[in-house]
């Protein structure tokens, strides 16, 4: 282009377009991120009955580093409160299934009873072990109300392993991994209850 004025105008228009795009991005990025975070939080907190908390549990971590357990790894933990009092602990756990790692969220009330278990991530066989992924999940709901004392430690196994729990059809390894991870979470809660629930006193 031999017209210097035309080149200058074109350059100016391109600059204005880039600037407008950048400003628009700045104006909407925060809102989009907030909405995405809210959706992610709701998906995580489905495991916890809404009448059990009035805080934002995911903003109140009580376990911040990975903890190796007997059959799984604790990835993190959060405290739910209601009226300023501890109402539940959410423990994020990872176990090794048949095809790969399985990540769970385990909700436990102050008495050590399970409020719910949800699968956050898995790569198990479709039609078999992957059945742990649905929500709500009928098999995972069989854990609700159970604790480390009911059944006792020996009962926290599949029936084929002389325990008290049924397995998912055709998915022994997956079922065993999930069951052991939930039991690990209950044991960790029992052994660290004061530490996990005591955070509320500092609010």
Image (cartoon, rainbow, N blue to C red):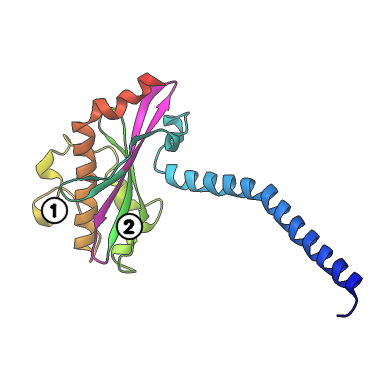
Specify the quadrant that holds the N terminus: bottom right
Name the residue furthest bottom: 1
173 or 166, nearer to the observer: 173
Which residue lies at the image location 55% right of the left edge and 49% below the top edge?
A: 36
What is the x, y in percent for residue 186?
22, 38
Q: Position of residue 139 (x, y in %)?
A: 30, 52
Left or right side of 159 for 25: right
Secondary structure under tag 2 reads helix
Label 1: element kind: helix
Where residue 136 appears, x then y in whole percent? Answer: 40, 50
Rendering quarter of residue 195: top left
Name the main secondary structure of what is drawn in magenta. Answer: strand
Counting residues from the N terminus, which is met first, the one under dot 1 or under dot 2?
A: 2
Above or below, comparing residue 166 to residue 83 in the picture: below
Magenta includes 81? yes
Q: Which residue is mark 2?
A: 132
Which residue is the site of mark 1?
159
């Amino acid at each position: 282009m031999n017209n210097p004025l035309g080149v200058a105008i074109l350059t100016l228009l391109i600059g204005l377009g880039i600037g407008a795009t950048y400003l628009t991005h700045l104006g909407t990025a925060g809102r989009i991120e907030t909405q995405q975070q809210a959706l992610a939080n709701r998906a995580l907190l489905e495991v916890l009955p809404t009448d059990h908390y009035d805080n934002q549990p995911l903003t109140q971590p009580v376990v911040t580093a990975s903890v190796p357990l007997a059959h799984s790894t604790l990835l993190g933990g959060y405290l739910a409160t209601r009226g300023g009092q501890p109402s539940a602990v959410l423990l994020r756990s990872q176990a090794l299934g048949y095809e790969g790692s399985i990540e769970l969220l385990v909700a436990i009330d102050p008495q050590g009873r399970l409020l719910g278990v949800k699968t956050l991530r898995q790569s198990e066989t479709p039609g078999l072990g992957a059945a742990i992924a649905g929500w709500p999940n009928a098999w995972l709901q069989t854990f609700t109300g159970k604790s480390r004392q009911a059944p006792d430690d020996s009962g926290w196994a599949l029936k084929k392993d002389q325990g008290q729990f049924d397995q998912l059809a055709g998915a022994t390894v997956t079922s065993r991994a999930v069951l052991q991870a939930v039991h690990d979470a209950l044991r960790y809660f029992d052994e660290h209850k004061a530490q996990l629930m005591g955070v509320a006193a500092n609010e």
